[in-house]
Amino acid sequence: MPYEFQPPLAAGHQPEMCGGGLGPYAPVEYSDDTQMAVCIAEVSASGADLRSSDSLDRIAANFLRWRREGASDIGAQTRQVLGAVSHPDGAGLAAAMRDAATDLHRRTGRSAGNGSLMRTAPVALAYLGRPDALAEAARAVSELTNHDVLAGDACVLWCSGIRRAIIDATFDGVREGLDLVPAQRRDQWSNWLTEAESKAPEQFRPNGFVVPALQAAWSAITHTAVPDHDPARGSFACQHLQHALTAAVCAGDDTDTVAAIAGALLGARWGSSAVPLAWQRVVHGWPTLRAADLIRLAVLTAQGGQTDSTGWPGCARAPRQPVGPLLLAHPHDPGVILGNLRTDAAAAHASAVVSLCRVGCDDFGDVAAANRVSAWLVDQPGANAHPHFVVDQAARLVAQLRAEGRVVLLHCAAGQSRTPAVAARYTTLTTDTPAPTALSELRQLLGTHGWTLNPELRQVVEEL
């Protein structure tokens, strides 16, 4: 946000999430791009077909609610369209909003801004198995505010990219989406993508128009090298997400929107486990959502609005395993308490919680939300996309919280595998203890409590 409508950042400059911008926004508060995506996700998370009149009416109503209640900044085109709709909700609202967008296009000839592309990601999550339906929904949601077909095309291409990135972890879906664009515009879009692949992101300015906005995001992604996987040197392939987002911001001009566009596809490719936990801890925005809430909306959307058999995501409390509460001090730091889902944060005197398993919305509710962070880590060999990065991130976040003077409860479901893995990595980060010794110490500490560290996590700790 602080860099919006500014020139490109100097080479080597690292953007900071310090707030400000056009809002002005609080530090680490997400802007209108994600706010509008939430308006869509609140509907898609119910399992609704976003192509239906009722769903589009609900999305349109959410846009107007956002304009009334939380819009700290609105793009010029979106502001005009929303301002032209007289009634706040009900049947026919989406049609009235489309009519306003059509009228704006008729009067100005300019309705291909980047405002619908920046918010389109939730649409892709709703149609992971149906590319044709995805294209129809992407265009229908775009047309609520952007009449120009180029805006709809861009949303189709990007949603196709997101879908493919989730299915097989590649960026091939963007070009695959050309088949979902009307034949008469495919060559032009193919040429625009090729141009983006041949030029640096900062060459696509101004980028308020949807085409250079997409090109700037695509350029940032394709020009950023994927790091080597070398855990011992702190290099992880999934850091491509961070580096490409930095490139998007450094391009200048409409920085929050280009980064939101790039971030949607990068997040699809690398997953939430690639988002640094320090970012996840603090990100927040309208309407009082945090990272866990955004993840909940995304998972529910991808699952057609359905929770799993335990009620996750969205359950008040995650199911407890048939083990007793665990409450043990880390062998090198009594301010780090090793626990499980049955551990009471108050009994541990904890002012921060780092969770290594699924938790419910009310779990550890006596700890401030800003000091409760969940790492996406599964206790099953082969089930994690980036186990080295996640274990390292969790341990580093514990170290950060301890540096702030907080007592940290580090836990997983049973406290027998993920917890000692991250605790061992914390040992190697903060002391001169080698990994085998750190693991041996924790096995001795947890031995009578059911040490079941899986071989993949052992290997991860040793390779880090």
Image (cartoon, rainbow, N blue to C red):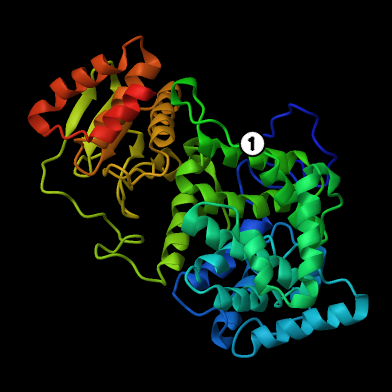
Give how far across and how far down residue 36 sits, in percent.
63, 64
Amino acid type for the residue under numbered disc 1 = Ala
Residue 335 against residue 118 in the figure, above or below:
above
Give how far across and how far down residue 17 sits, in percent.
64, 38
Q: Residue at x 32, y 18 (%)?
A: 427
The reply to whether residue 194 is in sight is yes
Q: Residue at x 60, y 65 (%)?
A: 160
Query: SS class of the residue under badge 1?
Result: loop
Give how far across and how far down residue 418 sits, in percent.
27, 36
Residue that carries the numbered disc 1 in the rendered image: 225
Q: Is residue 343 left or right of residue 218?
A: left
Q: Quadrant of the N terminus?
A: top right
Q: Residue at x 57, y 59 (%)?
A: 162
The reply to whether residue 70 is in sight is no
In which quarter of the view is residue 450 placed? top left
In which quarter of the view is residue 390 placed? top left
Please count the marks in the image.
1
Label 1 packing within 10 angstroms: few (<14), some (14-19), many (20+): few
- Return the residue found at the far bottom: 91
Residue nearest the observer in this picture, 130 or 324? 130
Residue 94 against residue 276 in the figure, above or below:
below
- Return the residue found at the far top: 432
In which quarter of the view is residue 283 placed? top right
